[in-house]
Image (tube, rainbow, N blue to C red):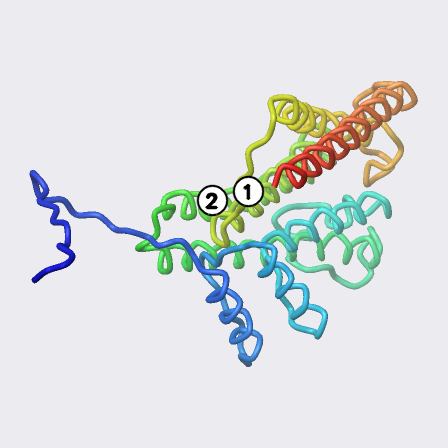
Amino acid sequence: MNLWSAPTFTPERKFDSTLTIPGSKSVTNRALILASLSKTTSTIIQPLIARNTELMIKGLQAIGVEIKNTQVDGQAALIVTGGAVRLTGSGLGCPTWPQCTPGSYTPVPHQAEGQLHAWIEFGNRLLTFLLFLTAVAALILSIRLTRNCLNKSRVRFLALYQVLGIFGQAILGGITVLTDLNPIPVAGHYLLSIALITGAIKLRLEIVGKQVQKSTPIIQTLLRLQILLTILVLIVGTVVTGSGPHAGDLKAKRFGFSPQVISWIHADLVIALTVTVFITYLLLKYESGVLLKRT
């Protein structure tokens, strides 16, 4: 006698599909531990990121395990080295492109721009090549390791975006040098780096997963306002730099705006962004407390 009969499903037509099962917290923690014991670099595809797996990551990092997003770190390093180029006046340390000086791709002894300026600018260029190799490796891995993933198209697009974006950075960098640090390509070079960092973070979230939580309409409005203010702060920030004294070279062209006035506008936008973030934080904290009381 059959106490339970298994249900049957007969499709009207044949279909071919792939089902990707969501990650497991326990499996993710085990994968993190096994990866930390490995002598080589490990890549964990689509782990489930939750409170306990985040604590596992922090615990492993506390004992010396290196867990990071290479692409994000590399793009951030490029911005830092770019800032060093500006502040030290090394923007034309390599006065031509793609070569550093006529006849040499690297700085040469006793060149007119000085060794310090030449090597600071050359270091910034060299980092672009390292980033490009990292992006190509990420693209290859995204194609090989996401064949059965539902979000493979998004992962591959974001990885390709990194490759194309870094190639675009190299072109913009060349235009910047060949136009003697014109502030327009200089601003575009920086803003493209910010866009690539955003894409690298999005790529990471597509790979490791992300927690989605519903929010109230007012929180959604504040978050959109934060995005808008952040974009304005970044754009106006490039105008401040393009109008101020730190151009990367004393003879570089400037936008022509009053550095004082444009700095005031930038400061007001930063204050507005800070206030918006603080208000959003308070509202989120209040909503979390209300949810805990209900449960």
Q: Nearer the viewer, residue 206 or 126?
A: 206
* Residue under the point 81% across and 49% down: 84
**Residue 101 visible to the viewer:** no
Give the SS element for disc 1: helix
Q: CA distance from mark 2 to mark 1?
A: 6 Å
Is mark 2 in CB contact (under 8 Å) with mark 1? yes
Q: Which mark is residue 158?
A: 2
Residue density around tag 2, few if under 14, some if 14–19, many if 20 or more, within 10 Å: many
Residue 221 position in % (x across, y down) = 64, 22
Residue 67 position in % (x across, y down) = 62, 65
Give the SS element for disc 2: helix
Residue 34 sits above or below residue 24 on the image: below
Name the amino acid type tagged 2: Leu
Q: Nearer the viewer, residue 155 or 13?
A: 13
Corner quadrant of residue 264 = top right
* Residue under the point 76% across and 25% down: 236
